[in-house]
Image (cartoon, grey):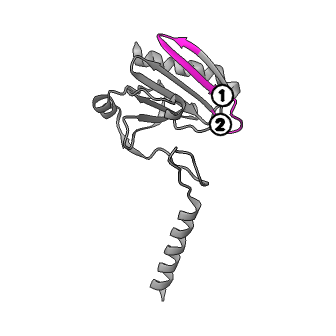
Amino acid sequence: MKKMLLTILTITMLGALMCSCGGNDKTGTATGTTFIPNPMVESSYAELKAKYEIDLPLLNGAKNVKYFIITGTSLGEVQFQIGGDKYSFRGTRKDLNDPQSMAGVYYEFPKTDKFSYDGCEVTVWYGGGKGAGLCATWRRAFDRYSLYSSALKDTDLEAFELTVKALIDKQYR
């Protein structure tokens, strides 16, 4: 009896889990309530640099650091915290049609800020509303990078841009 009850409970839970997760259509657009666009495998700074030629250095004071490779791509990611704010920093050596999507962020950001810094053209997206955070992308030669934080607000824009500049300094100096 217990075994049968456990089996029924397991099947019910799996069914509920499958119903609550959405999929995506052929364009990558979310079609359900949950969308996991970037399955990842844990990696290391050394592996990303040696195998994929992706340089994702960290800023001083970074904590809770985890490196990943996005499955089936040459897109690397490092997740970290500074001052309690969580960040996702990604990089690749491939040219991408949609630089914002490389950040893994699918908000509609109505505002952009563009600036040049140390040979990099940087675009910052903001104004996406509550929980959207701030997103920046930049490129230099063949390298493309993004930085995203859902913890930050539009009022943190200047500090966010300084963080982007500090990462560029770490990469190219």
Residue in the image at 50% along x and 47% along y: 26
Q: Which residue is mark 2?
A: 132
State the SS at label 1. strand
Image position of 167 with respect to 27: above or below: above
Residue 134 appears in which quarter of the rendering? top right
Residue in the image at 47% along x and 44% along y: 38
State the SS at label 2. loop
Give the side of residue 109 with respect to residue 101, left or right. right
Residue 69 rendering spot, x and y as whole percentages:
38, 39
The residue sitting at the bottom extreme is 1
Give the side of residue 2 with respect to residue 111, left or right. left
Mark 1 is surrounded, within 10 Å at the Cα level, by few (under 14), some (14 to 19) or many (20 or more) other residues, namely many
* Label annotation for residue 39: none
The magenta span reads 115-133
The residue sitting at the left extreme is 50
Mark 2 is surrounded, within 10 Å at the Cα level, by few (under 14), some (14 to 19) or many (20 or more) other residues, namely many
Which residue type carries mark 2? Ala
Depth order, front residue of 123/83: 123
Which residue type carries mark 1? Tyr
Depth order, front residue of 105/49: 105
Residue 143 appears in which quarter of the rendering? top left
Depth order, front residue of 158/74: 74
Image position of 145 with respect to 65: above or below: above
Q: Which residue is mark 1?
A: 126
Residue 136 rendering spot, x and y as whole percentages:
56, 26
Q: Given contact means CB atoms under 8 Å apart, are the residues at marks 2 and 1 in contact? A: yes
Residue 32 rendering spot, x and y as whole percentages:
60, 54
Q: Is residue 128 magenta?
A: yes
Residue in the image at 62% along x and 27% along y: 125
Give the side of residue 77 with respect to residue 48, left or right. right
